[in-house]
Image: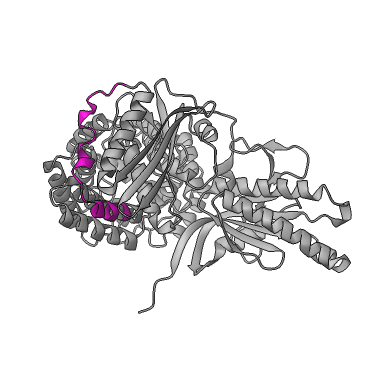
Amino acid sequence: MTDPIERRLAAILSADAVGYSRLMSRNDEATVRELDAHRRSIERLIDTYRGRLVDAPGDNLLAEFPSVVGAVRCAVEVQRTVAAANEKLERDARMPFRIGVHVGDVIVEGPRIYGSGVNIAARLEALATPGNVCLSDFVYQQVRGKLDAASRDLGEKQLKNIADPIRVHEILLGEGPAAPITGRGEELALPDRPSLAVLPFFDMSGDPAQDYFSNGLSADIMTELSRIPGLFVIAGDATFAYRRSGARPVEVARELGVRHVLEGAVRREERRVRINARLLDGSNGRIVWSERFDRELEDVFAVQDEIVQEVVTALDVALVGGSGAFETRKHLRNPQALGILYRGADLMHRFNREDMREARRLFEEVTRMEPESPIGYMDAAWTHYFEVQRGWSVDPEASLKEMSRLAQRGVELGDVSGFGSLMLSHMHLMRREHDAAMALSERALAERPSCQGAFGLRANILNFSGLPEEAVPLAQQAIRLSPLAQTFYPEVLAHAYYLCGRLEEAIEAAHRTLRLAPDSVDARVLLAVCLVDTGRVEAARKAAAELLAVDPGFRIRRFARCQPYRDPLVLARLAGSLREAGIAEGDGAPAAGGELAPPSTPSRRRIAPRPRR
């Protein structure tokens, strides 16, 4: 059987020396020496920003980065370093570079990467003025406000051998000032309570295959901290965006709007683990607290507990009811099971069907190794939910039943994390049992008062239950807790705005989602519907065509089956707008109640009337 092609999403940097052939014809030895010197400087910067040099043929360089911000910061530093070196040379002997940065799907073959993402980065590089950096629009949206540099919008460009035009922005490093990359110029206000971002702990083993352990440790510490009342903790999906970015803690604190940053490093040696952790003041980088933990691997949970307790003390936060906050992790004592659990979590959050199924297999292995621990059951339950939510399940009702069984078993075994309530509330939502879903989501919010998922999930349930006005502030809070990785939460916010009749705000939120996740089907649906409802039918039809380009099999009836609205009139209204936008019906009229359960009693609130045209 042929092995599946390995793919991944990466930030890609393509660089090219300008005038290399001309310089070679004048003085080949001096040109080769100069190019080698530039390459050594560029390779050091790529390493500094946690990138990987993929290839360096002739006068070109290609590198990939796990962080968009890291890739762009590296590109800017490369241009500044090259410019400083060129200043020492005669003008006609200087060798400037062009650089392009794009984020895209790449095919991995050994150390090489291929695909349209690489091609687009190369085309962007060719558009750059020597000494400058060209960015695709998606990259630009991620770095606005994060760079001390000016930029200009080059508009949409038709790139060679690329089907659709791409909006391009140029960072101006070799020219005079232009519009700064600052977005709206807004800074996140500091919360009125102790606030914290936990950076991914750095793995010191040098083996990328071991990253899952340090990532899992960081996630566990973050989870425990997020359950402490009175403490504002930034979500993990936001802070993990800084993994290998090279960003300083002061920059992280400013960008995320928090007062403190926790960072650390992990080294595993056979059956021992050493963890260095420190808490820094986000305003000046001053170390508030630091500690080194050297333990047997079996004691890793005790180390996690110690770090959390020390941080809480350093922040002077009262542990209200915190005595039970560490019970969940104490249930899992087998260090081998811990490694398997972290490996499964790493796979689950890649959100593709194959990795999700392998993650489930690993979580089931954890339950066999530690049958009395709630943790493996809880994580296995999540995989069933994602299968239903993403449309991968052949039998959604059977998946929900298994999800319920696993979650209930976890609760029986003493789970106090709040994940049980989160899972069961969404199971009730998918079955159109809205009152039960709302009650459980409220409980989850009380159990996890700093968890972006609890806010976002409850907002989602309120939307489908006919209470979108109450959903708006909760979705906004979920976004605030996860300011750098906003995909699901802006979708929920756009949905709430649509249901409230705040259509222009819904359109803006949908566009925001699509800048972060261009393949978001839900955001494209909301965009098409809102454009119809505001009288922009031609624009709506264009949005519908883009929706079908992302999901060619999209039909109204199929979509309706997965929409658990309490009030069938809301779904009928939405389906009507989709028809007007040009979406085909499918195999019949839209199903108001879906196929998992019959529709419930209509809600006590109605969607706002469509504006007159």
**Position of residue 262 measured from the top left corner of the image (x, y, whole percent):** 43, 34
In the shown orientation, is residue 177 left or right of residue 119?
right
In the shown orientation, is residue 72 left or right of residue 597?
right
**Position of residue 476 measured from the top left corner of the image (x, y, whole percent):** 40, 32
- Compared with residue 536, is residue 196 higher up or lower down, i.e. above or below? above
Can you tell which quarter of the image residue 113 is in? bottom right
- Going 25% across and 39% down the picture, which residue do you hit? 567
Q: Which residues are magenta?
A: 318-343
Q: Please, what is the dominant secondary structure of the magenta stretch?
A: helix
Can you tell which quarter of the image residue 99 is in? bottom right
- Compared with residue 370, is residue 252 higher up or lower down, i.e. above or below? above
In the shown orientation, is residue 196 left or right of residue 299?
right
Instruction: Check residue 39 for magenta coloring.
Output: no
- Going 47% across and 45% down the picture, which residue do you hit? 241
Report whether residue 470 is seen: no
In the shown orientation, is residue 15 left or right of residue 602?
right
**Position of residue 482 measured from the top left corner of the image (x, y, whole percent):** 42, 37
Report whether residue 116 is seen: yes
**Position of residue 513 measured from the top left corner of the image (x, y, whole percent):** 46, 44
| Identity of the residue furthest to the bottom in this view | 1
Q: Nearer the viewer, residue 589 or 459?
A: 459
Q: Nearer the viewer, residue 358 or 36?
A: 36
Quadrant of the image for the N terminus? Answer: bottom left
| Identity of the residue furthest to the left in this view | 412
